[in-house]
Image (cartoon, rainbow, N blue to C red):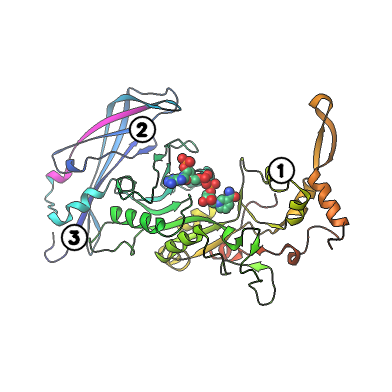
Amino acid sequence: MNAGVEHSCAAGFRISIGSETLIPTINKNKLFPPLLQFESRWQEPGEQLFPRVRVRLTFVVMSTGHNRRTLHRATHRRETSTKQLTSHTPAGTTAYQAATIGVQNPLAHSSFSPSPKSLPTIAKFAMMEDLDLLILGAGWTATFLIPLLQQRNISFEATTTSGRPVAGRPTIPFKFDPTDPDHTAIAALPRARTLLITFPLYGPGPSAALHAAYTTTHQSGAPTTTPSRTPFRFIQLGSTGIWQRKGGQTLPLSNPNPDGSPWLTRHSPFDTANPRAIAEDELLRLGGCVLNLSGLWGGARDPRAWVGRVAKTKDEVRAKKSLHLIHGVDVARAVAAMVGCNGATWEEHGEGQRWMLTDGFVYDWWALLAGWAEVRQEGEEGVEGGEVVPSQQARWVGELMAEGEGVRGLPRQMEVLGRCYDSREFWRVFGLVPLKARV
Ligand SMILES: NC(=O)c1ccc[n+]([C@@H]2O[C@H](COP(=O)([O-])OP(=O)(O)OC[C@H]3O[C@@H](n4cnc5c(N)ncnc54)[C@H](OP(=O)(O)O)[C@@H]3O)[C@@H](O)[C@H]2O)c1
């Protein structure tokens, strides 16, 4: 090592079986013996258990100092026998396969001698090749995001609380508990340049705790680096609900626009006392980014299915004004654009930025209810096949229009709808146009 230059180093592994990348469980105490042995285990769907698998193991030793460089990279290919394990869960029995893999440790044979000071840094790394994205919470959004990432060859891993596969991909079991001071589960997460947090965080504390725990357990470089100067990009999914208060009132209670315009943008005042907004603001202060999403639809989520829940009575229909939506495909495209943007774009448009995302439409609930009027009456004895008639909600819309609500035709004027989101800035800045709209 160069005298006078403070270096730290890191070592890591990536195991691939077939096209899958597995996260190995590494015993950090075994980084320096001549033979490295560690076990990896993974879940197989159904009964597909293989007695032997071909394993590709990439071993990387890296030094970070003034000039970051890779000191050693070795790829080992071998066939290895597997063990079959079963884990009993309340839902049933899950089959796992496990492989124990042993390789010569290049560290033990190189002239590289890390300083004792850097040893804790070395032990922190589970994988050296940073992923492009780590999805913390692969729920509904991930069913659109994962296929897009695969199409674009963006490397990623994803977590769920149970470790269930999502969109055909295995996930890492992970549940974030902001009250738990033990960061072992966070430390075991793979290292990624961008982290997408899809689940809600509430109030002061959790955003900072997750940010600090991931940063301190994954950052390389000088130990003096503070968690707030994170090398990682954090993106939190939020909701446009922060621009509303219970009862649907826009904030502040009087119209925030001096000209009385109904339009709100990402810069408009929002409910800063909303627990999600508090957590989001905390992440923004740490350099993260928040995407406030409007109503999510696509796949199994069909806004028509919401009608029975949100417009059960004529009074509920009377109160219904604007609706803003975004399709899962466009959420995925927005996230992929942020993951793929260069450092300058991230610094200008990602770091500390709150974005509002809609598909560009302001939907009028009355127009939607009238447009979805057709329902088929049940035939005799509940058999389908009766006459097609207007839904109850469409009839209420007709009555309200006739009762002198001042609405001569649909859709209603933006001023009548009262709360209209303008999210053009996001699409312009990231050079995108929504793919899906007009439910
Ligand atoms: N629904 C809407 O119309 C709407 C509108 C605007 C914004 N949003 C927001 O958009 C975001 C994404 O929505 P979505 O529908 O994709 O969410 P989702 O389907 O509920 O997915 C959330 C994911 O987070 C995981 N998770 C939950 N709590 C966790 C914890 N404490 N630690 C670690 N993982 C945890 C869940 O794991 P499991 O899979 O194991 O459960 C799941 O994979 C949410 O924040 C949502 O509130 C929703």
Q: Earlier in the sequence, mark 1 or mark 3?
A: 3
Asked if 6 appears above or below 146 in the picture, the reply is below
For the question of whether residue 271 can be seen, the reply is yes
Which residue position holds label 2?
42
Rate crowding at label 3 as few (under 14), some (14 to 19) or many (20 or more) other CA atoms within 10 Å: many
Residue 7: numbered disc: 3
Label 1 is placed on what type of residue? Answer: Gly
Residue 341 rendering spot, x and y as whole percentages: 45, 60
Asked if 3 appears above or below 22 in the picture, the reply is below
For the question of whether residue 330 can be seen, the reply is no
Label 3 is placed on what type of residue? Answer: His
Label 2 is placed on what type of residue? Answer: Trp
Residue 59 rendering spot, x and y as whole percentages: 25, 43
Q: Quadrant of residue 67?
A: bottom left
Residue 328 rendering spot, x and y as whole percentages: 58, 48
Residue at x 11%, y 50% (from the top left corner): 111
Residue at x 26%, y 48% (from the top left corner): 125
Q: Main secondary structure of the magenta part?
A: strand
Residue at x 69%, y 48% (from the top left corner): 310
> Which residue range is magenta in the image?
96-108
In this view, the residue in front, 265 or 88, is 88
Residue at x 45%, y 52% (from the top left corner): 197
